[in-house]
Structure formats: C-alpha cells, structure tokens
Amino acid sequence: MEAISNFIGQINGIVWGYPMLILIVGVGLYLSVGLGFMPWRKLGYGFRMLFSKNEAEGTKGEGEISPFSALMTALSATIGTGNIAGVATAVAVGGPGALFWMWVTALLGMATKYGEAVCAVKYREVDENGDHVGGPMYFIKNGMGKSWVWLGFLFAIFGAIAAFGIGNTVQTNSIASVLESTYSVPPVVTGVVLAVLVAAVILGGIKRIADVASRLVPLMAIIYVVAALFIIITNMDQVPAAFGEIFGQAFTGTAAAGGFLGMVIKGVARGVFSNEAGLGSAAIAHAAARTDNPVRQGTVAMLGTFIDTIIVCTMTGLIIVMSGLWSGGELNGAPLTAGAFDGFVSGIGNHVIAICLAVFAFTTVLGWSFYGEKCIEFLLGVKVILAYRLLWIAAAFGGTILSLDFVWLLADTLNAMMAIPNLIALLVLSPIIFSLSKEYFGKKKA
C-alpha cells in the first residue's frame, strides 16, 4: 500500500506541478484575450442575467432547473473547505502574496468557466430519462467528433472516481472533525445524520439538489460574508497594512514556500481548488439550466468564480493576514481561519467557522453527487444512477469514521487529471466560443 501511495504521490506532484498550472492559467489567459476580456467587461451584465425575472425563474428555453439554480448548484460544489481551509493553507505556506495569485487565477478563470458553460449548453444532450445532460465529456464527443470520444471517457472516469474523494468522503470527514472538536459530537453520530440528510436530497435528483442549494448556498454565503465584513469594518485601521502585505509579498514569496515560484504555485493551486475553473465540473450543472442561449448561461456561470474567490476567499484571506497568525507556523487550514476569526470576535468566531464549514462541506457533497452521477451515466447509462446514489450515501457515512489520507491523495490526483481533457477541449472549441459570443453581443449591441 505504501508503494501505491508513493506512486500516486509522484503522479500528484506532476499533475499539480508547474506544467498543469501553467496550462490552467494559460488557457484562461488565452480565452480572456480571445474574448476581448468580455468576462470582466460584462460582469454587471452577468449579475443582471442572474437576477432578471426570466433568467431567475428559467422561463426561457429547455432544461430542468433555472439559471440561478444551476449557478447555486455549481457554487454548492465550490464554496466549501477551499474557501476556509484552502485559503488558510495558501497563506500559511505561501505567505500573504499567495492571495494575490488566487485573484489572478480567478480573474482568468472567469473566462474558463464561461467557456465551459457555453460549450456545455451548446453540446448538451437529452438522456433516456428526458433530462438534459452535458459537461466536458459531452462537448468533447459532440463538439470534437467521434475520434475524440476516448478523451471524454477519460474525463468521466476521472470525475466519477474523484467525486467520492474530493466531493464526498473528504467533505464529510471535515464535517465530523469540526463538529467533534468544537461541539464534542461523536463522528458516528455525524455520519448517521449526514447519510440521512444526503439521502433525502440526492434521491430526488437534480431538481431537489438545486432546490436545496438555492436555499442553503446564498444563506450561508451571506452569513459568512457578513461575519467577515463585520470583522473587517470594525478593524478598518488594519486593512491598509494587510493589503500592503498581500501586494508587497506577491512577487517575493516566503522561504517556507520555496521562494517566489513556490508562493505563486501555492496561490494558483489553491485558487483552482477553490473555484474549480478549468476542471470542467461546473459545466455539468450549467448544462441542466433552462436557457435558450449558451452565451447567456455562460455569463451566469462566470459569476461563480468571481463570487467564490474574489469575494468569499478574499474575506477569509484578509482576516487571516490581519490576524498575523499566519506567520507563526503553528496553525494551518481550518484551525488557522477559526483562530483568526476568534481573535477578532472572541468566543464567537470559532463557532461561525465551524457552522459555515459544516454547511459548506454538506452542500459540496450534494453538488458533487450530481457531477459524479452524470460522469457514471456517460460511461454506463441511466440504469446505474440509483446504485451510484446509494453508494454515494454509504460513502458519506464512511467518510466520517475512516482515515482518508490515501483517498485524499487519489482524489486530488484524479481531480487534477479531470482538467486535462477539459482544457484540451476548450482550446479546440475556442473558435466556437468566440464566434457564439461575438454573435450574441453583436445582436445585443444592434
């Protein structure tokens, strides 16, 4: 087992190494330039589409859920441990400057997430159950031709397996750990409750997942952001110095991170882990949206990266930098974030982090259940969906009581490997993305 772990560890070092992160950032830059930086220029338009009556209710076009619900489902899978523990790890290891590179990754990742959603809606299909299905495996098959189907199968295999780690057991393990350490709740109790709650939601399919996500994600995101804003506003005198450290160290790095390149790679990697831009996962949710135009859904999809990293992760990172705890080397991950919050709001901050982490991780389990389900459906058909859901419920319980070091390593590796087929497809299909965007906004301007 140790030999297998070492082998996968070596692969992990490659797939999360410089070439992969250069590819992710490079594709984002290429799409941003090709789109004339449209995701930045049309950010306001995206929010108008999100909250307009027709878009919010999904009254235009075909699909199972509204564009708003599609975004909330995608956000349910991305707003999670990465926003709380991932940011803390980036700052603790790479220094405050890592946060700057998370911002860069997010700004370029908006174009990537936009392109993923455009292709997902453009090349989606209707399955045997009458549901719209899409994502990288489908836009590879339908957009790139039969000779590339094998690449879509690779994405689906990586996604179906990785989902059980990154989107299930790792998340439920985090929930069990934080509830045990904060409230002394036995992991087995957490496991039983989680299994029941997960079953109650995912057995209802995408409509129930989207309904729960549309209620929980905005509520918990608002609670978290309001709590963070309270700390920032009441300690406004420390904010300029915190931003000074972030920008001041953005091009220097720390010894612990191996210098400048180590700090950059940590910021980029944590940024991708947080918002999943480039992995192709969110496209699976956006393919189910009721919409009559791929570009319109793309403008909604790109908001996910902005909300996840530019807003939520920034709040976390800023408070950690303001606290000064990042430089001690004693805390990392969620405990560092909890310590930072509690340092400003004693006796309350750690509870805010514990509750938000638990709910965020729970919604991640819901969002990734849909991603994994659609990957396995692509491979084996709709007949395996119920079995997959039952296995998912069992894994949710198992994650709370098992040691997951190997599972985390395997899932993290496969998660990165999902990006390879997706990024190749985006490059090949980029002329379609550019053409559809030019046509859509040209008509709007006319």
Image (cartoon, grey):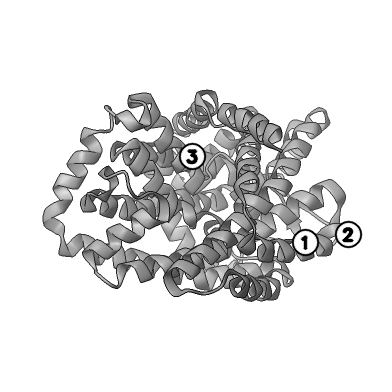
Q: Alpha carbon of mark 2 to alpha carbon of mark 1: how far? A: 14 Å
According to the image, label 2 marks what residue?
383
> Is there CB contact under 8 Å for labels 1 and 3?
no
The answer to whether 277 appears left or right of 238 in the picture is right
Q: Residue furthest left?
A: 237
According to the image, label 3 marks what residue?
111
In front here: 440 or 201? 201
> Is there CB contact under 8 Å for labels 2 and 1?
no
Compare marks 2 and 3 and give the one earlier in the sequence. 3
Q: Position of residue 299 (x, y in %)?
A: 50, 50
The answer to whether 177 appears left or right of 260 in the picture is right
In front here: 208 or 164? 164
Residue drawn at x 58%, y 36% is 433
In front here: 239 or 46? 239
According to the image, label 1 marks what residue?
391
Dot 2 crowding, Cα within 10 Å, few <14, some 14–19, many 20+? few
